[in-house]
Amino acid sequence: MSNTRTAVILAAGMGTRLGDRGRARPKGFLQLGDKPIIEESIERLRRSGIEQVIIVTGHCRDAYERLADEAGDFIRTVCNDKYSISGSMYSLYCAKEMIDGDFLLLESDLVYEQKALQSALSCPEDNCVLLSGFTNSNDEVFVEVDGNRLINMSKNRAELGTIGGELVGITRISPSLFTRMLDISERAFAESLHYDYETDCLVAAGQDCPVYCHLEPDLMWAEIDDAAHLERARSTIYPEIVKRDASLQ
């Protein structure tokens, strides 16, 4: 297991593809079980040895600020005031002054089993992108690899060479990689704040600072971007996650 003790959760997005559900509250406060998915994610992070969670807020930020107030020092928040005109890398950029050392990066709308964190944190490499087998979720991001090194990512599989798996959205980032990502993104922001931390910045940074991929073939997870994703997570993915997590206790 790594010495990573900090997690950064990107939670600024407006959830426009969820319609009224996304406008009324942040995606992290969607509920599949007894608690909102953001609270379940934070509990899994705590169980994995994470000691500090930084949440980058934006849309409906008050909900996350209340959560942080209730959690004491364990959760800190920082706001991306430009959330409506920016992408995920700008949100991460907003947290740069709060990040010290390596960290685990994920998003607020991610539903996953405990094994996902164990896999990401146990990678021998400092910079690790977690991959799964193919989910057929109709919104996949495929990852091209050379051996186990990240080469490229795309939703269009035909654009890529050897596919190592599907992007989950859990990444371990070292200080050197983060510095490179900040340098690249600062130049990109001169043209547009709509810059993605994965398909844009992480791929570009990986050309100079190697990023490795760790495949967990049988992994239960889902990202919730629209109503179809929500239904799939509720009916198929989440019940299996509950079973698998229970078997670890």
Image (tube, grey):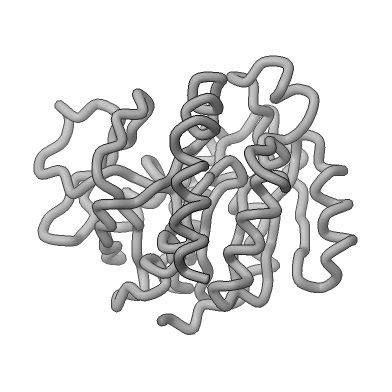
Residue 193 percent coordinates (x, y): 58, 36
Q: Residue at x 10, y 44 (%)?
A: 162
Q: Residue at x 36, y 75 (%)?
A: 122
In-image side of 124 versus 76 (left or right): left
Q: Is residue 210 above or below residue 22?
A: below
Does residue 20 appear anywhere in the picture? yes
Residue 248 percent coordinates (x, y): 47, 69
10, 187: nearer the viewer: 10
Residue 209 percent coordinates (x, y): 30, 66
147, 190: nearer the viewer: 147
Q: Residue at x 68, y 29 (%)?
A: 14
In-image side of 162 versus 125 (left or right): left
**The N terminus, quarter of image:** bottom left
Looking at this view, name the residue that lies furthest to the top: 19
Does residue 183 appear anywhere in the picture? no
126, 21: nearer the viewer: 21
Q: Is residue 68 above or below residue 103?
A: above
Q: Quadrant of residue 83?
A: top right
Residue 217 percent coordinates (x, y): 24, 52
